[in-house]
Amino acid sequence: MIIFDKLWNTMKEKGVSTYQLRESCGIDSKTARRLKANENIETKTLNKLCSVLNCRLEDIAEYVED
């Protein structure tokens, strides 16, 4: 299972809010909800997040066994 707990830590470290993500990279509220619930998202969304946060994928997502 892919979880996005690291995303929230990275956002906090960089001083980026959910509102700023929506405004700067087009993440809509539905996608933000999906991220918070660790649900499936598209790889293009991961690309946008890494680009806006200037980070690597492992800084925002993590695989954990079910």
Image: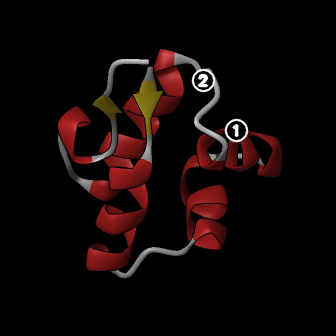
In which quadrant is the C terminus drawn? top left
Residue at image coords 32%, 56%? 53
The vertical placement of 26 against 21, above or below, is: above
In the picture, the quarter occupied by the N terminus is: top left
Residue furthest to the front in view is 66
Q: Nearer the viewer, residue 59 or 15?
A: 59
Label 2, label 1: how far apart the Cα atoms are = 7 Å
* Residue plotted at (32% across, 43% down): 51
Say which of 37 and 56 sits in front: 37
Residue at image position (29%, 75%) is: 14
Would residue 34 appear left or right of 45 to someone viewing this image?
right
Q: Is residue 65 above or below residue 47?
A: above
Which label's residue is closer to the chain start, 2 or 1?
A: 1
Q: Is residue 50 above or below residue 44?
A: below
Which SS class for mark 2?
loop
Picture quadrant where residue 39 is located: top right
- The reply to whether dot 2 and dot 1 touch (C-beta < 8 Å) is yes
Res. 23 image quadrant: bottom right
Q: Where is mark 2, residue-wise?
A: 41
- In the image, 5 versus 45, the foreground residue is 5
**Which label is found at residue 34?**
1
- What x and y, as percent, mark residue 20? 58, 70
Residue 7, numbered label: none
- Amino acid type at mark 2: Ile
Where is residue 16? Give x, y as percent.
Answer: 44, 74
Point out residue 59 in the picture as x, y percentages from the top left corner. Answer: 22, 47
Residue most toward the right? 30
Say which amino acid is labelled 1.
Arg
Q: SS class of the residue under badge 1?
A: helix
Residue 19 screen position, x and y as percent: 66, 71
In the image, taking residue 63 as reference, residue 1 lies left or right, namely right
